[in-house]
Image: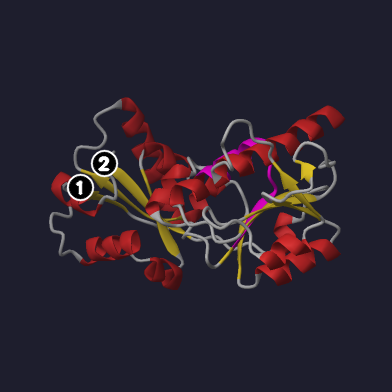
Amino acid sequence: MITSRENSRMKNLALLMKKAKERKARKLFIAEGIRMVGEAPADWIRGVYAAESFGERRQEQELLARLREGADKGGYLVETVSDAVFAAVSDTKTPQGILAVLKIPEYCLSDLLSKENPLLLLLEGIQDPGNLGTMFRSGEGAGVSGVIFDRETADLFNPKTVRSTMGSIFRVPFLETEDLMQTIHELKRAGVALYAAHLDGSVDYDEPDYTKASGFLIGNEGGGLSREPAEAADARVRIPMEGRVESLNAAVSASLLLYEACRQRRRQK
């Protein structure tokens, strides 16, 4: 059992928790909690750490048994850590007593376009980890084919973002693009119609036909989309507002657009 925070593996965990550069360099991230570890794809797991008190309940015992069985096949270790040390490395105030070190998967644009009539979400400069995670969760619920985001967007593998996806990070393909405009042009050449969520939109969000290959562009929480991606879109769409509200939270706007596309596609079946 690991009983010291000075243990080299605990130091590595702390770095992966806190440093985006470390996560990117090592192509690893951390998922914490019973649900997140339980839903993690087996071939992503590179190590599991459980607090010494973890395993008292039946659900915990079953998860540990499954992970230990998988460890034999996957070549990773399931380590026990003292409760005090686990609490010290955990990113949550009330740790659930288990976390996994996972590989960062790699997708390419063709993966996101592999389905017939793909539905995509394109993000520019989203700053709040909670918003980003919520977009993944809403995206999965609405049947999104993938999420594309630029390098100015918050770190997807920040522990807070990972938690807020509620497991959708394991199932929704994603791509971090170094050049959002180049990706937009590639999508347009592939026949994807792009719709920019914009305060100056010329059509209401429920008017266009989203049953064909479609993508929604969502901009920064404070400033919205920058000029170039907004002008490159096939149309700018707006969400009508009652009262004195000017705009909605970026994650809420993305969810409304995705579920409108989902509604249209359900009716077409």
Q: Is residue 83 left or right of residue 49?
A: left
Residue nearest the observer in this picture, 74 or 259: 259
Q: Secondary structure at mark 2?
A: loop
Looking at the picture, how far across and down is residue 60, in whole percent?
Answer: 32, 33
Give the residue number, with chain letter if any, for mark 1.
87
Q: Which mark is residue 52?
A: none
> Quick check: is 235 in the magenta stretch?
no
Q: Is residue 214 left or right of residue 229?
A: right
Residue nearest the observer in this picture, 200 or 50: 200
Kindly tell me whether residue 256 is visible in this rendering.
Answer: yes
Looking at the picture, how far across and down is residue 246, in whole percent?
Answer: 59, 42
- Circle 1 Cα neighbour tier, 10 Å, few/some/many (<14 / 14–19 / ≥20): some
Taking the spot 71% from the left edge, 56% from the top edge, the residue there is 112
Which span is picked out in magenta? 134-149
1 and 2 marks in contact (CB < 8 Å): yes
Taking the spot 37% from the left edge, 32% from the top edge, the residue there is 62
Taking the spot 26% from the left edge, 34% from the top edge, the residue there is 55
Q: Amino acid at mark 1?
A: Ala
Q: Secondary structure at mark 1?
A: helix
Residue nearest the observer in this picture, 193 or 42: 193
Give the residue number, with chain letter if any, for mark 2.
95
161 lies above or below 17: above
Looking at the picture, how far across and down is residue 161, in whole percent?
Answer: 44, 50
Q: Amino acid at mark 2?
A: Pro
Res 181 → quadrant: bottom right
- Circle 2 Cα neighbour tier, 10 Å, few/some/many (<14 / 14–19 / ≥20): some
Kindly tell me whether residue 269 is visible in this rendering.
Answer: no
158 lies above or below 116: below
- Quadrant of the image for the C terminus? top right
